Amino acid sequence: MTPPHEIIEMVEPLPHVAIIMDGNGRWAKSRGLSRPEGHLAGAEAIKRIVKAALYRNLPVLTLFAFSSENRLRPEAEVNFLFNLMHRYFDEHLKDLAKEGVYIKITGEIDGLPQATLKLIEHAQNATRVNSKMTLQIAFNYGSQEEIVYAAKSIATKVSENKLSPADITKEVFEEHLRTAGLQSPDLIIRTSGEYRLSNFMLWQAAYAELYFTDVYWPDFNERELDVALKEYSTRERRFGRIIDDDNSNDKKNKSFHEKFSLEKASK
Ligand code: IPE
Ligand code: IPE
Ligand code: MG
């Protein structure tokens, strides 16, 4: 298959892209359609973007499909969204598996309907050996719940003397998150003009680049993805450090540092 349009050149390492897919309802409303029709159009956008991510060799694509808080929506809409996930896998699991996609569902799965649990298990098992791209679907996912879950797992290990409190490091904590084993997102995209994370990957977003667009999710396409990737490629990720190729100020910095520390020391 050939890509739908020219793909931008990305400098390695390619980013883990996570998307907060928002705006299905408003997209539908703006067209005089129902919310379910908005979600159906959103599912089409998912198809497009998964393909686009594969073409671009992204190592991980995370899609925020359903939040813990989305359970507070009317029952009919919640059921519709659950059914949509079933339909998505019924229609695409085979192709995704063939394309080398590993599917990982991340979220609070305990307590989900039996049929959904089965579906998740099947999708994960059927793609377990794949390594071209990880498609992480955050489903029934909430970051605060995830952090509490990690804290509880760690507390249990401590109470069973399997872990000492002194050994709880950032890395150990991360291993107890629901996203354990996966790199954190490098780029988080949110569609629909909202400027918030809505309880998405609060821990993992510590140094993610954030990109917001007004485009409603059903209108998000390959080009929109490339605009986001291009913007990402211009960002300088410093992780708290100083990244400066220009050493012309080194002398000045050094003498100021020395003066300052002498002044401090003599006080
Ligand atoms: C995103 O679209 C899909 C989910 C959150 C499940 P919304 O349903 O939130 O759409 P808006 O925000 O009402 O437009
Ligand atoms: C975030 O969108 C959740 C998903 C995209 C799955 P919401 O529509 O639920 O977020 P809020 O309610 O506007 O913050
Ligand atoms: Mg929304």
Image (tube, helix red, strand yellow):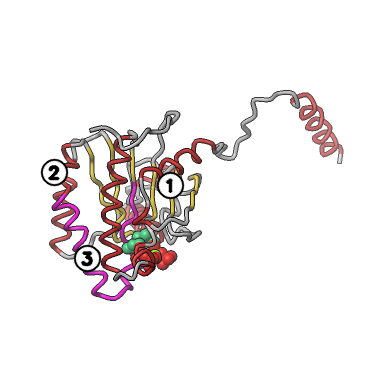
Instruction: Tell me, for residue 94, which label it has, or none.
Output: 2
Residue under label 1: 168
Q: CA distance from mark 2 to mark 3?
A: 27 Å
Instruction: Tell me, for residue 149, which label it has, or none.
Output: none
Q: CA distance from mark 1 to mark 3?
A: 29 Å
Q: Position of residue 205 (x, y in %)?
A: 46, 49
Of circles 2 and 3, the one toward us is 2
Frontmost residue, 128 versus 177? 128
Q: Amino acid at mark 3?
A: Gly
Q: Amino acid at mark 2?
A: Lys
Residue under label 3: 111
* Helix, strand or loop status at disc 3: loop
Q: Is residue 5 above or below residue 193?
A: above
Tag 2: Cα neighbours inside 10 Å, few (<14), some, or many (≥20)? some
Tag 3: Cα neighbours inside 10 Å, few (<14), some, or many (≥20)? few
Whereabouts is ligand 2, in terms of quadrant? bottom left
Magenta stretch: dominant secondary structure:
helix
Mark nearer the N terminus (2 vs 3): 2
**Residue 1 lies in quadrant:** top left
Horizontal arrangement in the rendering, residue 48 relative to residue 188 (left or right) = left
Frontmost residue, 230 versus 260? 230
* Helix, strand or loop status at disc 2: helix
Q: Position of residue 134 (x, y in %)?
A: 28, 41
80 falls in the magenta region: yes
Q: Position of residue 124 (x, y in %)?
A: 19, 46
Q: Is residue 183 above or below residue 113?
A: above
* Helix, strand or loop status at disc 1: loop
Which span of residues is magenta-colored?
A: 62-91
